[in-house]
Image: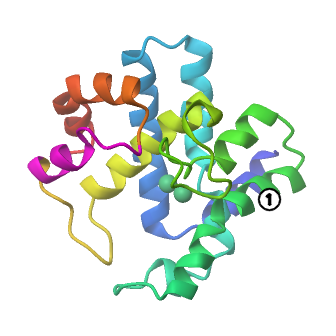
């Protein structure tokens, strides 16, 4: 994707999403190092994290910025952003199938409760599982227009033993919880 098109797409994202993807990108590379993944994998997830929510550029900002609970219909619309992200990237000539599968799969859950494909466990690409764990962590540990940042204990309790995450990744995450939490606080 050319830098110009990329810049235009990013500028369509609302401010909160821009901050979120910046945080997630930094957390992903740090977590990949803790997982002892290769430099290439670390670089890939750092990069993919920057545009994982690019599909939100087609969701109206009044929904993304809504301070109150979304209606079921609005939530269903927001949920289309992972498939939309893959579609947009393909339109712009992006053809790395692994990276596209990470964008598409970043809301899949280890226990099969995620979307869009309801993949289970290791059916979900490894780096999509990593991105999902970091994505959820960043979302609950940060302030949003519709909620305050959860306090550290509440974030820890939510993450620990949560079956939506890859257990091997979660173990390393919990061992390094303070380090990762402090990166964004
Ligand atoms: Fe997302
Ligand atoms: Fe995200």
The image quadrant of residue 184 is: top left
Looking at the image, which residue is at 26% across and 73% down? 147
In the image, taking residue 106 as reference, residue 67 lies left or right, namely: left
Could one spot residue 12 in this view of the protein?
no
User: Considering depth in this image, is 25 or 104 the residue closer to the camera?
Assistant: 104
Residue appearing at x 33%, y 47% in the figure = 137
Location of mark 1 (residue): 88
Q: Position of residue 29 (x, y in %)?
A: 46, 27
* Colouring rule applied to residues: rainbow
Q: Which residues are magenta?
A: 153-164
Q: Quadrant of residue 81?
A: bottom right
Q: Is residue 156 magenta?
A: yes
Does mark 1's beta carbon lie closer than 8 Å to ligand 1?
A: no
The spot of residue 85 in percent (x, y) is: 71, 57
Residue visible at 67% across and 63% down in the picture:
55
Position above or below: 143 against 29 = below
Residue 182 lies in the magenta-colored region: no
User: Which one is in front, 89 or 98?
Assistant: 98
Relative image position of residue 91 (x, y in whole percent): 89, 56
**Left or right position of 79 against 178:** right
Q: Position of residue 42 (x, y in %)?
A: 54, 21
Q: Is residue 14 above or below residue 96?
A: below
């Amino acid at each position: 994707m050319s830098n110009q098109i990329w810049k235009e797409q990013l500028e369509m994202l609302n401010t909160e999403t821009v901050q979120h993807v910046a945080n997630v990108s930094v957390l992903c590379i740090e977590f990949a190092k803790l997982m002892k993944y290769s430099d290439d994998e670390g670089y890939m997830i750092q990069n993919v994290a920057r545009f994982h929510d690019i599909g939100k550029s087609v969701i109206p900002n009044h929904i993304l910025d809504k301070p109150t609970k979304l209606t079921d219909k609005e939530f269903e619309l927001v949920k289309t952003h992972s498939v939309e992200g893959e579609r947009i990237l393909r339109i712009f000539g992006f053809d790395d199938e692994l990276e596209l599968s990470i964008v598409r799969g970043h809301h899949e859950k280890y226990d099969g409760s995620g979307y869009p494909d309801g993949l289970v466990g290791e059916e979900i690409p490894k780096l999509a599982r990593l991105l999902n764990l970091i994505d959820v962590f960043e979302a609950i540990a940060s302030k949003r227009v519709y909620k305050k940042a959860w306090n550290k204990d509440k974030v820890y309790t939510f993450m620990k033993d949560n079956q939506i995450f890859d257990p091997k990744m979660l173990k390393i995450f919990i061992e390094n919880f303070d380090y990762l939490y402090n990166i964004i606080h």
